[in-house]
Amino acid sequence: MKKIMIGAALLALAGWQIVAQVSKGKTRALETKTWMKTVNGPQCSAAAKMLKAGPADDKEWAALLTNGQMLSEAGFVLMADGRCPDKVWADAAKKLQDGGAALATAAAAKNVDDARKALNEGVLASCKGCHSAHKK
Ligand code: HEC
């Protein structure tokens, strides 16, 4: 009986650990939702808005390049500090690293088709992949 109770307590602790990992890393202050609100959300909406009509001038291409760099880096932040709980998360974070980088490359080359492809098949697929499993 004692053993069963200890087992149950350990299981509860493991479950709590996974929830804690998703919403926050292990040692640093940053909560996942803070990053989403300040980086992923705004960078992604700015890129999507820009790519509706397509960047109009050098300044707008430069802004899109920034969005791609920040989104790619976000993919690394999401893997840092023991935040990643499983393979779904890891795959989505990798997709964001690569999709953001592809968006930055397309913006540097001022290629609107490649930029849209990087946004839709890379970045947005990454958001969706992780959220469908991990965002309550
Ligand atoms: C690897 C996982 C992962 C990826 C990739 C991801 N998110 Fe999230 N996101 C989360 C989790 C987990 C939450 C819920 C956090 C919480 O409430 O504790 C969240 C919440 C959010 C929120 C709500 C924040 C709030 O106000 O509470 C926004 C907005 C958001 N994500 C935008 C994005 C966008 C845009 C992308 C793609 C560019 C993205 N996310 C990619 C995991 C991810």
Image (cartoon, rainbow, N blue to C red):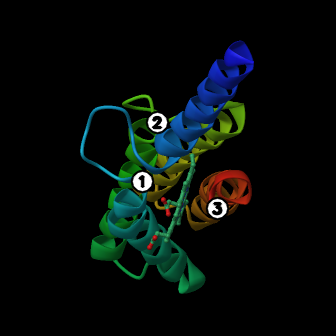
- Quadrant of image for the N terminus: top right
Residue 11 is left or right of residue 17, and the answer is right
Q: Is residue 125 above or below residue 112?
A: above
**Ligand 1 lies under 8 Å from the Cβ of mark 3:** yes
Q: Residues within 10 Å of mark 3 (few under 14, many from 20)?
A: some
* Residue 47 percent location from the top left of the image: 47, 71
User: For the residues carrying marks 3 and 1, which lies nearer the camera in this image?
Assistant: 1
* Residue 5 percent location from the top left of the image: 68, 24
- Quadrant of image for the C terminus: bottom right
User: For the residues carrying marks 3 and 2, which lies nearer the camera in this image?
Assistant: 2
Residue 118 is left or right of residue 34, and the answer is right
Identify the residue at the far top of this view: 3
Residue tagged 1: 32
| Element carrying mark 2 | loop
Estimate the spatial distance between the alpha carbons at disc 3 and disc 1, rounded to whole Å. Answer: 18 Å
Residue tagged 3: 124
Q: Quadrant of residue 6?
A: top right
Disc number placed over residue 83 in the picture, else none: 2
Residue at image coords 69%, 60%? 128
Estimate the spatial distance between the alpha carbons at disc 3 and disc 2, rounded to whole Å. Answer: 21 Å
Residue at image coords 50%, 82%? 49
